[in-house]
Image (spheres, rainbow, N blue to C red):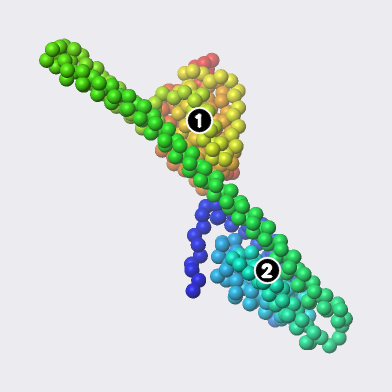
Amino acid sequence: MYSAAPELTATQRRLRRLNLITLLPVLALTGALVVANDTRHWWQGIVLAAGVLTALVGVERWTAGDFLRFAKPCLAITWTVWLFGALTASGAAFFSVSVVGPMIIPLLRRHRLLAALALAGCVAVAGSARFLVMTDGDFTQNLLQYVVAPTAVIFFVTALMFPSQRIYDLLLELEQSREREAELAVVRERMRFASDLHDIQGHTLHVVKLKVALAEKLLDSDPDRVRRELSEVRVLVGDTITQTKELAYSQRRLNLSTELENAKNLFEAAGILVRVERKAEVDVRAAELLGQGLRETTTNILRHAQAAQVRITLSASGIAIANDGAQDGPLPRLRGLSTLRERLADNGGELTVEQRDGRFLTAAEFPRKDEA
């Protein structure tokens, strides 16, 4: 028994939509022309239409990565339609088997050449049936039309399917590699967060340990010094708690230049083209919040978008980050950006988030000095 159809990844679903958009309309139109041009009786039209419909179903299943489950019935139907065409002098009936047959060969794991020869032989045998009912006409012309030409076409189309399948596989591998790079970039960002947390708490704990050890030694000889040391420990722990909260909520003081360089490195590691445009030097008053906005947006792009290009524009009082690859649908609710919008509003700034035609824009702006 055949297994169920494999669940497609996001990359495979995008490639499937692309193939459906580019292949099905062309094949459907060509098939309709074949049926209209070669139909002389209603029953002939039904048979030819059945072959075209089977070919379209086969293509749809091929784009879903599930064609081998349907290959045998599709090939049997289209071969029968071709045999019917040869017996009824309908050369265009070859269309359906020329679509279905060549799709099978590249999907086989072995004996591909033997399978290609067998397919061509079956096509030639079906075409030879024309001579069983031929009472008049040019023998050479019928040989070319029903045997030689279909066999050559099958070989040609099958040969084309191999590079086409290879290109499809390469695109899939590239997209999967890009997704892995994006995931790696997110992991690196988490490691950077862990490193910041270690810097904050590791230093504090080390100092606390030394001061507590000193207080133990001076407990009997210098109580006043002990009180000072313990007071410093209390202040130090309080500062560390505050810094940890700021880090957890992305409120730690940030350096915009450092964040910009980090964002470029993360995007490039994920295979995303980055373009940075500096229209003016950023106002020092706004740099910290803009750096936070850049960090949050970078994380969102890596996690939620399928971006190929990112453009970062810096002005005297703002930053705009635009990316492609935004998912279709309503504007997503990103809690990090909601928090950032509130902080910007509290400081007189404004956060703009737009999603349109597959592009996502995040822009943070403060009033300029001459407007304040």
Residue at position x 59%, y 44% from top? 357
Q: Name the residue under label 1.
A: 262
Q: How far apart are marks 2 and 1 (CA)?
A: 52 Å
Determine which quarter of the picture holds residue 323.
top right
Residue at position x 15%, y 12% from top? 222
Q: What residue type is labelled 2?
A: Leu
- Give x and y (percent) for residue 37: 77, 72
Along the horizontal axis of the image, is 61 left or right of 209? right
Please state which of residues 297 and 247 is positioned toward the viewer in this rendering: 247
Answer yes or no: is residue 238 visible.
no
Q: Earlier in the sequence, mark 2 or mark 1?
A: 2
The numbered dot on residue 113 is 2
Residue at position x 62%, y 55% from top? 168
- Give x and y (percent) for residue 349: 47, 25
At numbered mark 1, what does the secondary structure look like: helix, strand or loop? Answer: helix
Pair 2/1: label in front: 2
Along the horizontal axis of the image, is 158 left or right of 145? left
Q: Which amino acid does label 1 sit on?
A: Asn
Q: In this view, does 204 lie above or below 12?
A: above
Answer yes or no: is residue 265 visible.
yes
Please state which of residues 6 and 95 is positioned toward the viewer in this rendering: 6
Q: In this view, does 109 lie above or below 257?
A: below
